[in-house]
Image: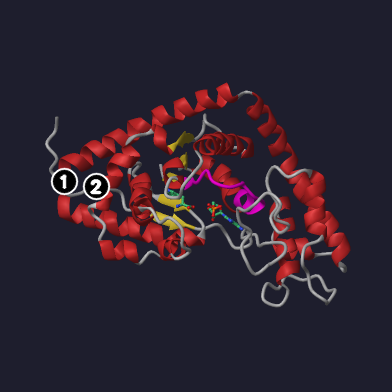
Amino acid sequence: MTRVFSGIQPTGNVHLGNVLGALVPWTEDQHRADSLFCVVDLHALTRPQDPDELRATTLRLTQILLAVGLDPEVCTLFVQSHVPQHAELAWLMECTAAYGELSRMTQFKDKSGKGGFVSAGLFTYPALMASDILLYDTDLVPVGDDQRQHVELTRDLAERFNSRYGPTFTVPQATFPKAGARIMDLQDPTAKMSKSEDQAPGTILLLDEPKSIEKKIKRAVTDTESEVRFDVAAKPGVSNLLSILGAATGRTPEEAAAGYEQYGPLKADTAAAVVERLAPIQARYAELAADPGETTRLLAVGAAKATELAAATVTRAKANIGLLPR
Ligand code: AMP
Ligand code: TRP
């Protein structure tokens, strides 16, 4: 059976783009493949984190994943730091990756160029990501476009290791969500909706109140025409609303456009569709948040399942690279 692995960082707030672009597709993947989903807390450490905040965000993100529909009976859901093999294999990956190769990662160049503290972990991050993926003999890695280069590097590292030390890793492939699932900022529809401060008017957060969702969509940037049509280049704002309405109601943006002549009703219906799509997720989240012990229990089960797979891979990799068995 096809093995799927993906990860999400416990930083910032989960927003509508994450839900429609990544989490909902994951809930579909879990039924089609043998899937593992990982809250990658070690990746979050590449930038300074407040310890209490990191713990709280990791728990909250897990509860959101469960609320969106990841079913621990169907897939394996776990926290990265609960499975020590991630850090262990990452070292072998760091020693397989070339310095120059890691220097060429565009995400590292972007993030390190912004000033502030640049950890060595920010530089070696792709080696940890390669470890995440290779530990589970992963075939497919559903990710956003910004992770394409990291998955390419993972393939290169797997092939290099295999050719140096003999067959060890499955060479994975990235998969990308279908077009239309890319949600843009409501105030700047040429930029991706992204994790940000609580009050950002262009970002709809998963845990936003209905009133706040309605307000943000009502104020979304459109254009001075009044025609409703899906045309990303000419009408980015309106097209984004159609993408959101379509994704929230299981249709293409073009299908969602049918019947609208004015922006007012389009905005009202988009807001209503988003509120309706998020309501059951928010309700389930509230239940899980009220009983953190249940989440902890589910995570222990996930970690045990993941560890069993990961341990076998690490044993194989260590033996092949020439580490003396104990
Ligand atoms: P990030 O929030 O950037 O860590 O991304 C977590 C996951 O959500 C990745 O799979 C991204 O591709 C996806 N994602 C993030 N922002 C958006 C967006 N605006 N539209 C669609 N998918 C997104
Ligand atoms: N780097 C990814 C991101 O920032 C998260 C991630 C870590 C990941 N390890 C992974 C994604 C392994 C897919 C597979 O979005």
Q: Is residue 98 left or right of residue 1?
A: left
State how the image is colored. secondary structure
Mark identifier at residue 297: none
Give the image quarter of residue 96: bottom left
Give the Cα separation between the discs numbered 2 and 1.
Answer: 9 Å
Helix, strand or loop at label 1? It is helix
Placement of 60 over or under 174, stated as above or below = above
Regarding residue 34, the answer to whether it shows in the image is: no
> Marks 1 and 2: in contact by CB < 8 Å?
yes
Q: Which residue is mark 1?
A: 321
Q: Which residue is mark 2?
A: 92
Quadrant in which the C terminus is drawn = top left
Mark 2 residue crowding within 10 angstroms, few (<14) / some (14–19) / many (20+) = some
Give the image quarter of residue 5: top left
Of tags 2 and 1, which is closer to the observer? 2
Boundaries of the magenta span: 6-20
